[in-house]
Image (spheres, rainbow, N blue to C red):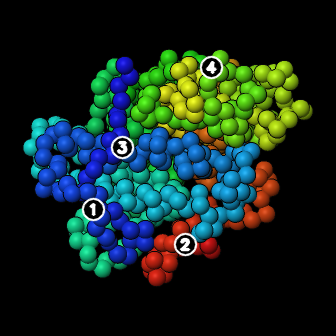
């Protein structure tokens, strides 16, 4: 039986920070008080699982809907499209970000609460009787979860509000919590992730703790933070750390095998949301497949929504093996040959980004295949980029790292002399990461780092509203209103 981190949203006495964070309010979830829970090691484990893993799950921030950070961010880029006319998609697809937009703003207020809950949980488990090694692991997991979630929000919105433990323990005081400075924000994330480095390097699939946070995850988030900050030297250090034998990461031989039920826990996976029948399940294929697309399992739900635009699809070489799971040409169950020239309503806005294999036991919208959040191909290509940016020179090592991913797709290896300058290499890395990591939530940050996010919105999304300030998402208007203007909106929104 698959081992799981089961996200138990227990009935706990707790605290949630209000969206504006200008006042702190106490909320009772039921009659269980902190003097009654947690009392022992098992209680502490449950509390940490709920507070640290609950937000970072396939049911919340990594959900396959518009409320999922990977889907939301990629939909604003050249590789994301949706065939539905739901109210929230036009703002994402056309770069009409406003403080009243649903999808671009929802993460800010929703997940500040979870950062505060992790802070409180650290205090609540600190004096619970348990073995020291267990306590240290649980505290490290909380630091990892809090730092990681803070990074995800920082990437979207810039510096956020962080409540201190004293403020959280005195919720009736009229406290105004400002947004941190950029320096304070980076230090907060770094400090949390540094504290989490005591975690085990990794867990094997057979380990009962598989699915819990690891040191490999910590260094991956740090790598992304340093790429965000253009701190190339520290990014290189993190990338090299993750190549050490103690982590055991390596690329799978075949791209499509990374995303199958049979190959869960493969060596390429750095961290995945554990999915299991009846517990936590993702809904990717339901959002992608149309009823005309043939599947071995006839019980899979097919809503026909997400697509990769034809412009991006045409950037692939015809021999690229990644096209095996990015489908732009197929014979439907109705006998019709669907492709760009004959799209019907199925391929009207682009190709099917299938990626994940079928769950043979699926009976509706949900799949029990683990949802991969970070993997080694992401690290190798970021390291290649960081090495070149740091040296301001294309090196053989960087080309070799890029080739590890490029040739796995069945493509001819790059030679050092293929790149006349640094810009040509960085362009190749950007394209490779797009081809490799579509709908894994990296494209927005990649385009911003390369200075192309707004350019591509105008060129490929045909947006007339995209502006340079939209590299950051807007803070929800409700937060601004409730703070009586004390919380600064991101510029020009």
Q: Earlier in the sequence, mark 3 or mark 1?
A: 1
Q: How far apart are marks 1 and 2 (CA)?
A: 26 Å
Q: Earlier in the sequence, mark 3 or mark 2?
A: 3
| Occupied quadrant, residue 49 | top left
- Residue 133 left/right relative to 219: left
Residue at image x 74%, y 26%?
Answer: 293
User: How packed is label 2: few (under 14 Cα within 10 Å), some, or many (20 or more)?
Assistant: some
Q: On the rendered structure, is 99 left or right of 24? A: right
Examine the image and state in which quarter residue 111 appears: bottom left
145 horizontally vs 358: left or right: left
Residue 53's disc is 3
Q: Which residue is drawn at 58% across and 73% down?
A: 491
Q: Which of 201 and 391 is in front in this view?
A: 201
490 or 102, nearer to the observer:
102
Residue 297: percent from left, percent from top: 62, 19
Q: Residue 406: x and y, percent?
A: 64, 27
Query: Mark 4 sits on what residue?
Result: 297
The image shows residue 217 at horizontal and vertical percentages of: 40, 38
Is residue 361 something that shows in the picture?
A: yes
Please report contact status of discs 4 and 2: CB closer than 8 Å, yes or no: no
Mark positioned earlier in the residue sequence (4 or 2): 4
Q: Earlier in the sequence, mark 4 or mark 3?
A: 3
């Amino acid at each position: 039986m698959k081992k799981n981190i089961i996200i138990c949203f227990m009935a706990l006495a707790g605290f949630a920070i209000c969206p504006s964070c200008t006042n702190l309010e106490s909320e009772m979830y039921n009659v269980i008080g902190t003097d009654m829970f947690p009392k022992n090691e098992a209680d502490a484990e449950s509390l940490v699982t709920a507070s640290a893993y609950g937000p970072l799950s396939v049911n919340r921030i990594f959900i396959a809907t518009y409320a999922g950070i990977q889907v939301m961010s990629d939909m604003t880029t050249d590789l994301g499209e949706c065939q539905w006319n739901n109210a929230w998609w036009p703002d994402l697809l056309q770069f009409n970000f406003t403080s009243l937009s649903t999808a671009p703003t929802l993460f800010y207020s929703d997940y500040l609460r979870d950062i505060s809950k992790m802070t409180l949980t650290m205090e609540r488990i600190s004096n619970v009787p348990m073995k020291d090694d267990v306590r240290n692991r649980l505290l490290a997991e909380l630091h990892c979860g809090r730092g990681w979630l803070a990074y995800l929000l920082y990437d979207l919105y810039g510096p956020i509000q962080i409540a201190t433990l004293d403020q959280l323990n005195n919720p009736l005081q009229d406290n105004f919590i400002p947004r941190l400075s950029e320096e304070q924000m980076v230090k907060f994330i770094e400090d949390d992730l540094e504290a989490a480095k005591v975690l085990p390097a990794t867990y094997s699939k057979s380990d009962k703790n598989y699915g819990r946070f690891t040191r490999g995850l910590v260094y991956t988030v740090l790598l992304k933070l340093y790429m965000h900050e253009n701190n190339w030297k520290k990014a290189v250090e993190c990338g090299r750390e993750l190549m050490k034998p103690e982590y055991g990461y390596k690329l799978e031989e075949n791209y499509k095998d990374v995303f199958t039920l049979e190959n869960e826990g493969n060596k390429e996976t750095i961290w995945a949301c554990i999915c299991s029948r009846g517990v936590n399940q993702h809904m990717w294929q339901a959002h992608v497949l149309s009823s005309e697309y043939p599947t071995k399992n006839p019980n899979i739900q097919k809503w026909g929504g997400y697509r990769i635009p034809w412009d991006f699809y045409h950037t692939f070489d015809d021999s690229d093996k990644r096209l095996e799971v990015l489908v732009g040409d197929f014979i439907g169950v109705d006998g019709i040959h669907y492709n760009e020239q004959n799209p019907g309503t199925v391929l009207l806005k682009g190709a099917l980004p299938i990626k994940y294999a079928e769950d043979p036991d699926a009976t509706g919208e949900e799949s029990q295949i683990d949802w991969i959040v970070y993997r080694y191909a992401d690290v190798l290509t970021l390291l290649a980029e960081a090495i070149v940016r740091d040296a301001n020179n294309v090196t053989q090592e960087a080309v070799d790292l890029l080739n590890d991913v490029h040739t796995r797709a069945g493509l001819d290896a790059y030679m050092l002399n293929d790149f006349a300058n640094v810009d040509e290499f960085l362009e190749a890395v950007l394209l490779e990461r797009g081809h490799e990591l579509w709908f894994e939530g990296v494209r927005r940050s990649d385009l911003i780092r390369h200075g192309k996010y707004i350019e591509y919105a105008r060129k490929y999304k045909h947006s007339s509203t995209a502006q340079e300030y939209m590299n950051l998402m807007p803070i929800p208007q409700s937060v601004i209103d409730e703070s009586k203007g004390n919380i600064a909106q991101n510029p020009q929104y």
